[in-house]
Each structure stands twice: as structure tokens, then as C-alpha cells.
Amino acid sequence: MKKIVLAYSGGLDTSIAITWLKEKYGCEVVAMAADVGQGEELEPLHEKAIASGASKLYIEDVREEFICDFVYPMLKSGALYEEKYLMGTAIARPAIAKRLVEVAEKEGADAIAHGATGKGNDQVRFELTVKALAPHLKIVAPWREWDIKSRDDAFDYAEKHGIPVPVTKEKPYSMDRNIWHISYEGGVLEDPSAEPEKEMFLLTVDPADAPDTPEYVEIGFERGVPVSIDGQTKGPIELLTELNSLAGKHGVGRVDIVENRLVGMKSRGVYETPAGTLLFFAHRELESLTLDRETMHFKEIAGVKYGELVYYGQWYTPLREALDAFVDSTQRNVTGSVRLKLFKGNITVAGRKSPFSLYREDLATFGADVIYNQQDAEGFINLFGLPLKVQGLLEKNKK
């Protein structure tokens, strides 16, 4: 191999990977950092990457593509992993790997490399995307090759080679940040009985310290896609940024989960997804108004599978594309707005409306009405309950 393009974050693993790849393979290493909304984390990367031995660094702004082509389809699907995780890390990986492939082809590289460990999910997510989009590229995963066995070993390697890293042995948990979330893993969090330190959280205040007065926000949707806040149209980056700030101020969006990794082990992750939590909640409320019962119930089943595909790194698969076609069909009438009340880490719905609402007050009312004939219910119950009646007669005749 003459040239490798490395998915570079500036964290511990990718910082030492540049030096290691050059030592191991004696080839040129090009670093590529995808801007998916890390913010100030990107500023020092150029100097660090070059100092670590990279021949050049690409910083690629993929924020809008990430939101519109990856996050919003997942949001519309209603996908959660194991009922809690909004998959901020998982959904970013195919977006990053897609741009990694594009840079590798532009550079005429022989291979790509990533800093994911051999124990985690990210190795699968990166590599499945590369296999789908550029099957001719070789894939190098240093964590599966080098003699470094632990974070302490990685720190020692960095110190020996004079590589600056953003974490320390005293504070070794790792973070992954984008405009959708922040994840925290490792270090003190490896004990699932230990409460996360209050100072760890970067996007949300402690709910106990949140304002003592609730705040309302109205989120508008068009065909399942969020488009406005309090009646003001917002672009995707602006919308997520504003909702992150608002929800974070009220302590909304924290998740602490022991999840089942694809590779078979359980791991403990702590996540902050402020805007995503609001959007998922509001989207579901709007669907309750605009989707018929059978579609809504089947979509819940499909959402579980969609979540698994995202979590397992199977974004570029025929099944995900087919599910997107189904989901988009269900979203034709998911247009309207939802008003939310935020208070001390909690969200409650304060109102929902849609021009395509299937809710009819004249049908649902407990008052007098002239549309619904309550006597019709007797025949419906008799037919609906007929199998149970037959079963009951059989059981009675046995005695």
C-alpha cells in the first residue's frame, strides 16, 4: 500500500494511528475529519494531524447531508435501539464513511483506515459502508493488528512518540460528538452501578438545576420532516442547534443504557440527545394524530428492524432502502405542529394539530352525537368475540 486515508477525529485512537500506520506500512497517510457538528473540536485538528505525521488533512463539512440524508430518515422511521438509544453515533458512521470513500477515490488511495476497536460496533459500521461503496479498497483496522491492548498502552505510545491526546489516564472515558448527540463510554462508566459525574455532561444541565419555570416550544413538520420552531422556518443545522440549546437548558435528552453490542457483549453508554429527544417525541405525537391504526402499529414493528439496521451498520442495504420507501409512504400526511412543555428533564405534550388529522371530535365525544350509533357496537362485539365464545363453550362442555 502506498497511500491510506484515515478517518481522523483527533482522539486518542486516531492520533496514535497516524504514526503507527506510517511505521507499520511505510506509506503516506492522509487524514480525513468529517464535520458532523463537533464544533470547536475541529479547530486544532490540522496542526495535530500534520504534527502526528499525516501528509495532509481534509476537514469535510457534511453536516447538512448528515442531517437530511441520514438523521431525518431515521427520525421518520421512529427507530430506537433497545427502546432508548437514539443512535447518534451509529447513524453518523455511514455518513462519515461515505465521505471517507470519496476522499480515498480523489486521492487515489489503496486503502482506508479507522480507529475503531475490535470490541466495538463502529468497526462494523465503517467497514460495511466501505464494502458497499468501494469494495476494491483495502481496510486497515489498527486495533486489530497492533500490540496495544488497552487505553493505558495507547497513552504510553502517545507519550513515547510525543503525540498530544485529548484525554488523560485520570479521566479516560471517551466521547463522540456530533450535532445529534454526545456519547460517553469507558473509564468510570464501565461500572454500570456508578452514577455519571455531574461535570461530565456538556449539552444538558442537571434536571435538578434546570429552570423552575416550564417553557413551551412548538415544532412544525412537513411530511415527517421538522421544518420550523414556533412558526419560524429553520434550516436543518439551525433547527437542531436551536433545539439542542433549548432542550439542554431544561435538562432534557439524557439516556443511560446498558446495551447489547453487535459483537455480543453488553456495554454501558451514556448519551445526550437534546434536540433529538424533542423531535422524536413530537414526531410520534403528530403521527398519533395522522396515521391510521393498522399503519401505525405495523410501522412500530418496522421501526424496531430499522433501528437494528442502523445500529448494526447496515445502512447501505436493500432492506433499509425498502423500509425507507415504506416509511416515506406513511409520512405523506405527517404535516402539522406539536407544542411541547419542557420542565426539569421532562417533556409533556401541550397540543397537536394537523390539516390531515384523523381525529374527529364528533366521533370521539362523550357528549350527545348523531354520527355514531352505539347500538352498532353490540353486533361488532358479538362477531369479534365469537372465537372466544366458541372456546368458552368447549371448555364448559368438558366439565
Image (spheres, rainbow, N blue to C red):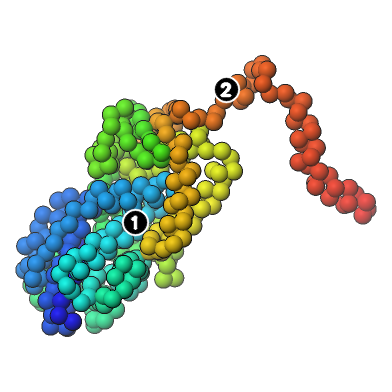
Quadrant in which residue 194 is drawn: bottom left
Q: Which mark is residue 361?
A: 2
Crowd class of label 1 (few under 14; some 14 to 19; many from 20; radius 10 Å): many
Horizontal relation, residue 76 to residue 156: left or right: right
Quadrant in which residue 100 is drawn: bottom left
Horizontal relation, residue 9 to residue 387: left or right: left
Of mark 1 and mark 2, the one earlier in the sequence is 1
Which x, y percent locates residue 187? Answer: 29, 64
Amino acid type at mark 2: Glu
Q: Compared to 180, does 345 lie above or below?
A: above
Which x, y percent locates residue 114? Answer: 24, 70
Residue at position x 68%, y 23% in the image:
372
Which x, y percent locates residue 247? Answer: 31, 38
Quadrant in which residue 41 is drawn: bottom left
Amino acid type at mark 1: Ile
Q: Is residue 152 visible?
A: no
Residue at position x 20%, y 69% in the image:
105
Which x, y percent locates residue 151? Answer: 24, 71
Q: Compared to 183, does 236 lie above or below?
A: above
Q: Is residue 304 visible?
A: yes
| Residue where numbered disc 1 is placed | 91
Horizontal relation, residue 262 to residue 271: left or right: right
